[in-house]
């Protein structure tokens, strides 16, 4: 187990190098000269040159890349062109926002997805299954921003039940923090909830057909014991896989929801960085996203070991 | 489908009902003379704050709006954009026009306790003129700054420069505490303005706290002023509609829905900001005056404003709008909509079959819609316009490099009218890819800048606009409405022609 974790951690380093090199190269494809943009509309050619020198943009590509890696290793991701603030600082400021949103969305996804999946799997092919499957299809089909706008209009603007926009850190009170994440969290959770419900439905329906379940029935175990103690633990494996990938999706897929709800998190930062051709910010965000994805898949693999002892031994 | 969503949302909402307690503000319009309760915060949303919090080193003129909250300026502007006393109580000019004496306000201190005096002005202007300062080109006529006594300072100029006064109402006139020079001003500003920066998440949220020792306490209405950056106009409208904000920046698309609500007050008016179609006069057929004029005659601006800007804009006939001292009333109907005249003009230079050109268009929905309407209008005169949308970050740079034959962009007004004129029409300016100016432009601008009195300068600046428009150097489209939408509890908000200042804005008791 420990060996597996170490091996996987070791893999992260070369993956990060490849990802950073690719992003750094991609930036070359963006038309225009960053120095001209940063220097501003009324800058003289001398000022543009000075900006290029200050930022090291006049150096060869590989030298620029080496400087970037050297900085990145020590946690210095450069300074945002748009805001003149270290990219690492901006990531640090915005991570809690997106993390909060992701956590709340995940909570809703589990609260909605697991009951739906269990009901659908337990009553596979019967009416409750049809209803649950219909709802999950809906959850997958409705774009989250459309749902978000609808909820803002009805629940926030017209009824005043929830704040329509904005984010407040947890330090300003748990209630204030949570209430502002309800609507965006719900909007964001739908697709994930639907994914969880579908996976769970399939695997519960499958485990309930297994021989050991018939044995359990023969032993006279009650239906809830069979369902929750014997079926669920086996049925959760595919759900955990989906969950790991969905967390990575949530962390990266918040851009539109953040814009709709006026939340300044990583998604909003990424959009602004791309629109503003803020190269250090784009690189920082991509590196971060790659790291999150790698770490999440590692956590998923470790959790397999917990859920399925066979994996631990191999 | 709606029922399904409503059911899911409703179920969760019921569970959470107990925890929520968000309420809207009071009903009915607030009394404009209502007393302000300074303890209630202003929560303001704008699509932008600042790229740097250092007024001299920033590269963006647009940063001035936010920075004016923190840094006080030597000269202020009234709502019409005319200069009024700021940190300088008065100023006078010698007969030659090359020495401007400023008499400074007494008892002013910076946020760090340092005294604001003539020496501080001298040090600040020196800093604003350093080669790496974005403000340096705006102060190029300044030769030296002389301290007479703590309350008197003289700007010695190489040539008379009437634009100096209003230039000092912009970034170059913002005073930084000299004790803080060399500190990290880009993130930790130290000025003498109405507010200090208490907290900030760059590009997201800036918490401003009133500076108790500010010399004009009347102009500080709220003890806290939270400036939030929200790019999407609809999101801003949702925020103010549900009480998450009480003052937001106007965007033409949200004016009509905001007017429909009786708990919101819309204050939108023309500003110096305009949408323009600028020609590269070295490309396509735009070297010919007749061709440029034909484009202007072929355009129907009322139709563009109705079709793309929800009528929340005024027809532009020149660089400056009605109500501003540099506006020239005689130019208002210089190029009426006249497709036949456009065709005749094209025929007169052998282009009876029309011609085609490529326009780089700022890729925001409104601007692209404007371009599509213009494309249809020009087609009536036989002109074939190809639209190439370009991102904001690339547009000016690409056009100035010589890409495209024309560019449709949003121009932002600056403190002094001559700054805009120089930025786009001076032969040497990086923002002028044509690399030439119409005959008489330099002389007329020099003449306008050799006088200081606002009324007289206005007359001379109007002459500069006449030269530009008779030469049809560019096609003005519209001055779009800007300003604020306030909740009815907000008192004292007034839109400014050049840059809102939020002086005395607060929440009613």
Image (cartoon, coloured by chain):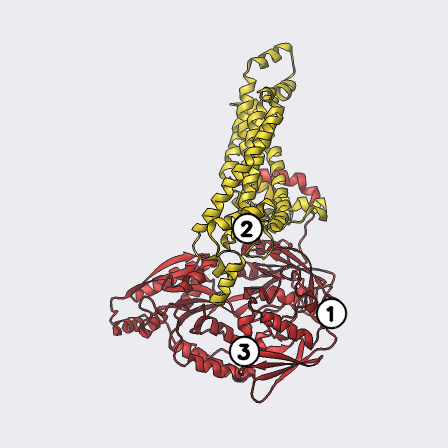
Q: Is residue B267 left or right of residue A37?
A: right
Residue designated by label 3: B141
Whether the residues at callouts 3 and 1 have beta carbons within 8 Å, the answer is no
Subunit that carries the residue with mark 2: A
Looking at the image, is mark 3 or mark 2 nearer the viewer?
3
Instruction: Inspect this view and state whether residue A128 appears.
Output: no
**Which quarter of the picture shows residue B278?**
bottom left
The span from disc 3 to disc 2 (Cα, nearest Å) is 38 Å
Counting residues from the N terminus, which is met first, the one under dot 3 or under dot 1? 1
Name the image quarter holding the C terminus of chain B: bottom right
**Secondary structure found at label 2:** helix
How crowded is the residue under tag 1: few (<14 C-alpha within 10 Å), some, or many (20+)? some
**Which quarter of the picture shows residue B434?**
bottom left
Residue designated by label 1: B114
**Front-most of A162 and B392?**
B392
Subunit that carries the residue with mark 3: B
Question: Residue at horizontal 56%, vertical 18%?
Answer: A208
Residue designated by label 2: A281
Residue A65 location, x and y as percent?
50, 48
Please tell me the colour of chain B: red
The span from disc 2 to disc 1 (Cα, nearest Å) is 36 Å
Can marks 3 and 2 be said to lie on one chain?
no
Whether the residues at callouts 2 and 1 have beta carbons within 8 Å, the answer is no
How crowded is the residue under tag 2: few (<14 C-alpha within 10 Å), some, or many (20+)? many
The span from disc 3 to disc 1 (Cα, nearest Å) is 29 Å
The vertical placement of A142 against B57, above or below, is: above
The vertical placement of A191 against B261, above or below, is: above
**Front-most of B479 and B431?**
B431
Instruction: Inspect this view and state whether residue B334 appears.
Output: yes
């Amino acid at each position: 187990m420990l060996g597996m974790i170490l091996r996987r951690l070791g893999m992260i380093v070369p993956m990060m190098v490849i990802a950073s090199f690719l992003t750094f190269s991609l930036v070359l494809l963006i038309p225009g000269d960053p120095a001209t943009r940063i220097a501003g509309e009324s800058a003289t050619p001398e000022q543009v040159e000075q900006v290029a020198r200050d930022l090291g943009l006049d150096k060869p590509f590989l030298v620029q890349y080496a400087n970037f890696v050297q900085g990145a290793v020590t946690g210095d991701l450069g300074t945002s062109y748009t805001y003149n603030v270290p990219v690492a600082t901006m990531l640090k400021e915005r991570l809690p926002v997106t993390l909060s949103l992701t956590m709340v969305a995940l909570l809703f996804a589990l609260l909605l997805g697991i009951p739906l999946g269990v009901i659908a799997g337990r009553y596979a092919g019967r009416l409750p299954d049809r209803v649950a499957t219909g709802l999950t299809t809906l959850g997958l089909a409705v774009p989250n921003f459309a749902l978000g706008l609808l909820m803002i209009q009805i629940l926030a603007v017209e009824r005043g039940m929830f704040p329509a926009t904005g984010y407040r850190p947890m330090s300003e009170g748990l209630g204030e923090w949570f209430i502002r994440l309800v609507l965006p969290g719900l909007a964001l959770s739908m697709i994930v909830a639907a994914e969880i419900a579908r996976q769970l439905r399939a695997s519960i329906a499958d485990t309930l057909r297994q021989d050991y379940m018939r044995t359990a029935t023969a032993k006279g175990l009650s239906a809830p014991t069979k369902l929750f103690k014997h079926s669920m633990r086996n049925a959760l494996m595919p759900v955990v896989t989906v969950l790991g990938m969905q967390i990575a999706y949530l962390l990266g897929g918040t851009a539109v929801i953040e814009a709709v709800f006026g939340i300044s998190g990583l998604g909003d930062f990424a959009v602004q960085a791309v629109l503003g051709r803020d190269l250090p910010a784009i690189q920082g965000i991509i590196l971060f996203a790659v790291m999150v994805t790698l770490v999440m898949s590692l956590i998923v693999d470790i959790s397999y070991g917990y859920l399925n002892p066979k994996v631990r031994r191999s | 489908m709606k029922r399904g969503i409503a059911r899911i949302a409703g179920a969760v909402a019921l569970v959470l009902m107990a925890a929520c307690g968000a309420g809207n503000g009071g009903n009915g319009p607030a009394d404009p003379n209502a007393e302000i309760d300074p303890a209630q915060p202003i929560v303001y949303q704008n699509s932008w704050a600042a790229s740097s919090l250092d007024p001299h080193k920033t590269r963006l003129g647009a940063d001035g709006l936010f920075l004016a909250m923190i840094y006080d300026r030597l000269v202020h502007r009234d709502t019409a954009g005319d200069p009024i006393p700021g940190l300088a109580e008065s100023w006078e000019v010698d007969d030659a026009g090359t020495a401007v004496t400023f008499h400074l306000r007494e008892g002013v201190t910076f946020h760090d306790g340092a005294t604001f005096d003539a020496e501080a002005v001298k040090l600040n202007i020196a800093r604003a003129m350093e080669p790496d300062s974005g403000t340096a080109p705006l102060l190029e006529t300044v030769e030296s700054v002389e301290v007479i006594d703590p309350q008197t300072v003289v700007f010695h100029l190489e040539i008379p420069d009437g634009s100096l006064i209003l230039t000092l109402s912009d970034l170059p006139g913002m005073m930084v505490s000299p004790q803080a020079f060399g500190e990290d001003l880009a993130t930790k500003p130290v000025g003498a303005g109405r507010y200090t920066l208490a907290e900030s998440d760059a590009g997201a949220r800036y918490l401003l706290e009133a500076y108790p020792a500010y010399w004009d306490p009347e102009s500080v209405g709220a003890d806290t002023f939270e400036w939030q950056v929200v790019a999407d106009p609809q999101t801003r409208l949702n925020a103010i509609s549900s009480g998450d904000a009480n003052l937001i920046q106007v965007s033409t698309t949200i004016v009509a829905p905001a007017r429909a609500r009786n708990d919101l007050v819309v204050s939108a008016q023309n500003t110096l900001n305009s949408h323009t179609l600028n020609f590269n006069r070295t490309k396509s057929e735009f070297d010919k005056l007749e061709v440029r004029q034909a484009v202007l005659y072929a355009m129907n601006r009322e139709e563009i404003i109705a079709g793309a800007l929800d009528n929340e804009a005024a027809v532009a006939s020149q660089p400056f709008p009605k109500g501003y001292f540099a506006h020239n009333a005689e130019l208002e109907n210089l190029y009426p909509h006249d497709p036949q005249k456009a065709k005749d003009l094209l025929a007169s230079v052998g282009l009876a079959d029309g011609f085609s050109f490529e326009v780089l268009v700022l890729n925001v929905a409104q601007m692209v819609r404007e371009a599509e309407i213009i494309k249809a209008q020009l087609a009536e005169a036989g002109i074939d316009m190809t639209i190439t949308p370009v991102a904001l970050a690339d547009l000016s740079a690409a056009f100035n490099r010589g890409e495209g034959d024309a560019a449709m962009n949003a121009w932002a007004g600056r403190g002094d009218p001559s700054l805009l004129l120089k930025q786009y029409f001076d032969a040497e300016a990086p923002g002028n890819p044509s690399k030439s100016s119409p005959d008489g432009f330099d002389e007329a601008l020099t003449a306008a800048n050799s006088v200081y009195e606002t009324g007289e300068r206005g007359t001379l600046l109007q002459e500069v606009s006449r030269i530009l428009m008779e030469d049809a150097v560019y096609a003005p489209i519209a001055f779009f409405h800007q300003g604020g939408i306030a909740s009815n509890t907000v008192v004292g908000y007034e839109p400014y022609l050049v840059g809102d200042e939020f002086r005395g804005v607060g929440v009613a008791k």
